[in-house]
Amino acid sequence: MSRFEIKDKFYLDGEPIKIISGAFHYFRTVPEYWRDRLLKLKAMGGNTVETYIPWNMHEPKKGEFTFEGMLDIEKFIQTAQDLGLYIILRPSPYICAEWEFGGLPAWLLKEDGMRLRVNYEPFMKHVKDYYDVLMPIITKYQIDNGGRVILMQIENEYGYYANDKSYMERMRDMMRGYGVTVPFITSDGPFHENIRGGMLEGAHPTGNFGSRTKERFDVLKNYTNGGPLMCAEFWVGWFDHWGNGGHMKGNLEESVKDLDDMLDMGNVNIYMFEGGTNFGFMNGSNYYDELTPDVTSYDYDAILTEDGCITEKYRRYKEVISKYVDIPEVPELLESKIERGSYGELKVEDKVSLFSVLDDISTKTSSVYPVSMEKLDQSYGYILYHSTLETEDAVAKIRLWEAGDRANILVDKKPLITLYDLELGKEAEVMSDEEVQKALQLPLEEQMKLSQRGKDIDILMENMGRVNFGPRMEHQRKGIGQCVQINGHMHNNWDIYTLPLDNVDKVDFSKDYIENTPAFHKFSFEAKEQKDTFLDFEGWGKGCAFINGFNLGRYWEIGPQKRLYIPAPLIKEGKNEIIMFETEGKYKDTISLKDEPDIG
């Protein structure tokens, strides 16, 4: 068996080794492409791959675990091992990663008073239950067990979040108790306070940063006790959020210089080697002054594009890496037949209103007051609150209490108002005071003709992606948690429909379509061969898209992303079906499948 150690440098079987790693998240790329991406990492000179492990995906419901398909962590590790790569695993309960809720399962929030990432017994009990299942799967691949896992991370950027040493010590001891024998690392921001908050005895500190390498390493030296310097996340680009005005890009020349400095002084994990895609509803969000949910693409301006193409950054990085290690020949790359293709313009075949199929895709819950998604055992997607205006003649003002993140409000199946983020907690004026007074001055008979009493009110709430960073994480329940206030009073008696949209195969397109309401639109196309393609949603408003039942992610006309990536393995030879769920009632009778991305 081999041995990996941390002394003045990293050592493998007594010989110094320079870690040149690339971050690649198996859960953001279809498994058919894992080998291709890892071959490209090896061909660039990388000797190691690093990945997070997302708790929320592997335990989507309490006590229900999945390790199949895109979540087959063992297959991913085995693929890397077969190619001769070493592996760094980051199985922390929290991963950040611009991932929904930082990788924590949303069902944690069903429990009142839940405290995250501290030594709080209910939280630690859930972590233990998860590790009971996860750790036996991954520990057998450690290098001293005959595998190629050389490092594991205890927590993730903990010094940015808190400084509960008892929690960190408990996490360390728990992992050792599960048989983790390889060295531990922590990774934190490159500032004294962050490192001090996140480091602990028995784990080697590393830094996360994207520039000023010499300056950052000079800070890190104070804490490594003469050990090796490593940037555990060398940020080579950045992520996009909806409405940010354009695709975020790094400075290539500065980045190349930083990589050179990094390899001259120490070790690196390039974040990201390939970013991949936030399929489904898995994008995270940040929240400083306002909610900024991330787009579906996690291209990140990485070394490879979202769909795995080699970039100029790849070529420049390879030149730098060749100064420090011999670049191997990787003839297997010639076998890769991944191609982009266009399937042309598709015409809509059917459409149906969400209201027509509610009972087909959801089960109604009735409640005197609204309750959040999590209290109804729902984690992602949408949730609809339906009621009747029994006492209100009109909705003049409305306010949603403890609500997140976006509300489409309709009366009598007609759009009334859309509220987003900060607007939800304020009283929104649908009618001005002047309009209300004018209506009240009409004869009673005329007032009654205009009255909305007895009509339906529907509130479609969308979880835009839970915040993945900072103290707001403990306040991420979605839907409506307290009440709906109409004209100054709480409105009661609601029918609630959970809509995770994990069953679009049950949508019955023979039912009624109602204009300007949230609706499903169906398209199909024939494929003689499978190629990567990109769904152009120009002319559509906001929603999400599915191919053959697989959730491709969100679209939104505000950009910067203008097309959704469809990997070829999701396309079948023969007939394929695409469903667009459009919430704004803004659509065209066509979509297009093109051979180029457009991420802004």
Image (cartoon, rainbow, N blue to C red):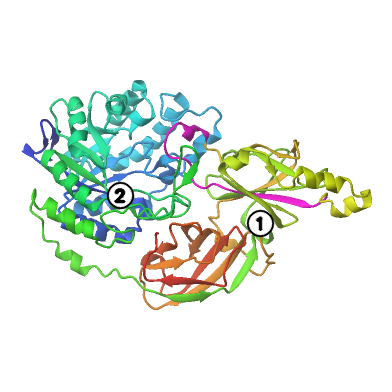
Q: CA distance from mark 1 to mark 2?
A: 42 Å
Q: Position of residue 580 (x, y in %)?
A: 54, 64
Mark 1 surroundings within 10 Å by alpha-carbon count, few (fewer than 14), some (14 through 19), many (20 or more): some
Residue at disc 2, secondary structure? loop
User: Circle 2 is placed at which residue position?
Assistant: 237
Q: Is residue 421 left or right of residue 232?
A: right
Which residue is nearer to you in this view: 195 or 134? 195
Residue 216 appears in which quarter of the rendering? top left
Q: Position of residue 329 (x, y in %)?
A: 11, 61
Task: Give the residue furthest to the top.
Answer: 166
Mark 1 or mark 2, whichever is nearer to me: 2
Which residue is nearer to you in this view: 177 or 397? 397
Q: Position of residue 536 (x, y in %)?
A: 46, 67
Residue at (84, 47) in percent of width and height: 438
User: Circle 1 is placed at which residue position?
Assistant: 358
Q: Is residue 390 left or right of residue 319?
A: right
Mark 2 surroundings within 10 Å by alpha-carbon count, few (fewer than 14), some (14 through 19), many (20 or more): many
Residue 213 appears in which quarter of the rendering? top left
Residue at (12, 38) in percent of width and height: 265
Residue at (30, 25) in percent of width and height: 193
Q: Is residue 414 above or below residue 202?
A: below
Which stretch appears magenta?
454-475
Q: Is any atom of residue 184 visible in this view?
A: yes
Which residue is nearer to you in this view: 135 or 233? 233
Q: Is residue 579 above or below residue 123?
A: below
> Is residue 545 inside the magenta stretch?
no
Say what amino acid the circle numbered 2 marks: Gly
Task: Give the residue furthest to the left.
Answer: 15
Residue 191, labelled with which disc?
A: none
